[in-house]
Image (cartoon, helix red, strand yellow):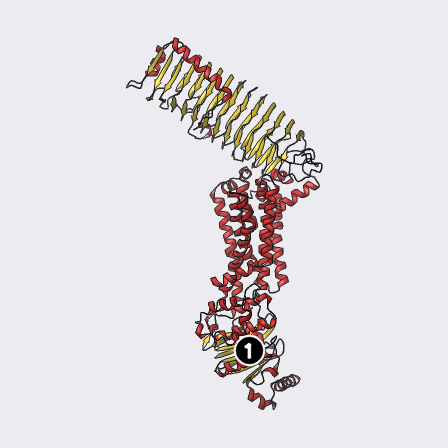
Amino acid sequence: MPKLILYIFRDILRNKIVIALSIFLFAVSFVLFNLEENSSKAMLSILNMALIITPLISMIFAAIHYYNSYEFIELMLAQPISRKKILSSEFFALGLALSVALLAGLGLPLIIYQSGIDGIWLLTTTIPLAWSCIAIAFAITVNIRDKAKGIGTVLLLWFYLSLIYDGLILFTMFSLSDYPLEKITLGLIALNPIDLARVSIMLKMDVSALMGYTGALYKHFFGSVYGFAFTFGILLLWIIVPLFIAHHSFQKKDI
Amino acid sequence: MKWSSNPKYSLPYILFFCTLFKTSAFAGRIDVYPLNKNLEIKEAIAKAINGDSIFIHSGLYRENNILITKSIHLIGVGNPVIDGEHNNVTITISGRNITLSGITIQNSGHSAMNDIAGIRCIDASDIHIIQNKVLNCHFGIHVSNSEDILIQNNEVVGTPGAEQNTGNGIHLWKCNRAKIFSNYITGHRDGIYFEFVTHSIIQDNKSYTNIRYGLHFMFSHNDQYLCNEFRENGAGVAVMYSKNVTMEENLFYKNWGASAYGILLKDITDSKIEKNHFFENTVGIHFEGTSRLKILRNEFISNGWAMKVQASCSENHFNNNNFLANSFDVATNGSLVLNTFTNNYWDKYEGYDLNKDGIGDIPYYPVSLYSIIVEQFPGTMILLRSILINFLDKAEKAIPSLTPENLKDFQPRINKNTL
Amino acid sequence: MIKIAELSKSFGKLNALKNISMELLGGQLTALIGPNGSGKTTLIKSILSLVKPTSGRIEIQGKNIGNDDNYRTSIGYMPQIGRFPDHIKVYQIFDLLKNIRKIPDHMLDEDLYLEFNINSFRDKAMGTLSGGMRQKVNAAIAFLFNPRILILDEPTSGLDPISSEILKNKISTENKKGKLVILSSHILSDIDEITTHVAYMQEGNLIFNGSFEDLQLKSNEIKLGKAIAYLMRSQQSNITQ
């Protein structure tokens, strides 16, 4: 399996989309750092960009990669090797390749411009988010045979998780503002990996503002190690659970 | 603890020691050592006449209720410790021309009813309280109805308890011409407390991790606050019901909480806030009922809200400040705006400068739609930095509908103001 | 070698395989024949566990294939379209598969690798190969591990006549060594000489399964193509009756 991961990983690294992603992230980060005289603002812009780009590219690319590898997967499945190993190899290879792309595209400028803790934080958040998005994309594509339909569904899901979901939360809060919604809101946030990554970044960048919120639960949540443990714990679940679903479907699937 | 010397006031300080030296040359000198007997200091005071110096040598003195009414100087040699053994006020000063220096005073009594302190001054004038340590006392240094008080280089460390059971670090009530210089205060209810104190200066103090306010003052006019550091206090700094106040070059850092502010300003008029640094506070400055204030050349970095300006404020001028990496720049609770903003640098400004004069060609609206939403629905804070929120804010900037149309910086700067 | 019992497979409403039972033995070269959509590929994929049957059993060398993956060590498979990741090089594919199969080098069958002269383009990326070159790689892989069972789906399509001939000879040689070969092909004239058995499928049913000689006798035809045409005709007359 390590060899299989290695070869798929190398194949993906040479892929045009991945190279373009790296170059794009690198160029934008570089320009932002150069353009903004104060690096904290550049950092904020990069964070915002990373939160949009990472899930989008991870999900779409994972879906495209899955469909393009279909014949290869079929061929490999004719070999004495389990389906679990094949799908895991594809997953890990993708995860590693996108991690490398993010490290090169975001990590390098962050090192060059010495962003310190904030830079490390950005990477420790976006990389698990990328893995989670790959797992989610797999859980969908494994269940949809048609390539266009599969990619379309993944794209829709990205749009939903990035934008519509937050709109629904906002709407809920407007309409139920008389009720204590703290726990429900935290629960809703936990149900969306992109929101979770965003909250984890907020815990670093906006803790001063978050401490202004009066609710005891939020305060406990944001003001302690508990918040970090919670966001990363759930983010980890957001990798494991979709991957489990993908494996489960893939196991029973007709290739 | 490193004391920063303050060049502006070092001259009077030297002069003070000269006079001390002169008087002691003429006046008597009494030395006190910690013997088996318990009442050395009180006895020495009883023996002393005006102008005498009492040198208290190192060791532990278990005494309390020490009363000084004569014009004498108590000078610690080798850091003597006076332990009040949790009984009443440790030292009371009531007279004129009295010095207390180099002494550690610890364990005063505690009382929820009376203002019990390590050092207490009542009806006094020309008092110097210098380089003492006041540890684990209810109030640290409590001054009332006094004039010309110098409190300098003291270390006042309380034991934080419940807010109502803990006294203030340096507490002044009804005083005139007080100088509070280079003290370090921590663990009290309010670090420095002023009520009815006029023509006074608070400078180079460090007030950290006090339960309520780092600095709390009310009804205190014509005072100056310079170069102090207020850090991680329960509620930051509160300045209320006062006029002609000058606040310059102070640092406000990490004052976090639902009602914590770098500075809370309430009913302040004709005052100046200049060159201060606000860093990582929940709210940099909260303005309520303020008028005719000048807020100039301050720097707001990484605060939750750089400023909250209530609609009850008028004729305040916000010029040449820098706003960087704050979650929100300005929030307000109404649509009426009677204040002016000019020449500030806002890092969120996205305008252009075609004529290259360093001033943006379109105005900047520092109040975002989202800040208004958060004001009404605090729970929506969880959506900070969401793409949706970015979209909403962008849309609102393009077609303002809910944000106050008049709250804008007509001449936002393209580059940071040099402070 | 392969025993299929009452195998059915449906995809939703479509019944791709209808209650198929057959036995395939070593030394047979079974031509799996049928029109498009007759269920040939589904049958092959079922044998490889790529498709999970709705009901029925498949035993290979006496063992139910169930959830065991190891039985596929005895199968060499050449798919109709074998696509590899674009940026993997030819030698890396071989390297990868050797790594999976874990068979010592001296037991490898490198005949096709040598005859197709794959060494000459071993450093090329798979994405840059022509269709024919890819088929050569696929064929070489199927035979490389000396499997007892060879499943070849349209093996000669896309190959030039010379390579096609090389492959046919190789198939025949291996078959004569006692290996079971299952071969599906449209171009029936191609496999005339080497076929020993014929399995004819139509609409998910196994219409005929027996030796080529039996079929020749039954249909009174020598050529495989004509014999198959006979089967199709008799099938049609069955329906009209």
For this view, does B57 lie left or right of residue A234? left
Rendering quarter of residue C138: bottom right
Chain label for disc 1: C
Rendering quarter of residue B301: top right
- Residue C196 rendering spot, x and y as whole percentages: 54, 85
Residue B301 seen in the figure: yes
Residue A85 to residue B214: above or below: below
Rendering quarter of residue C13: bottom right
Residue B122 seen in the figure: no
Secondary structure found at label 1: strand
| Amino acid type, residue under disc 1 in the picture | Asn
Q: Residue at x 50, y 44 (%)?
A: A227
Q: Residue furthest left?
A: B36
- Residue C110 rendering spot, x and y as whole percentages: 49, 75
Residue A1 to residue C59: above or below: above
Q: Residue furthest front?
A: C120
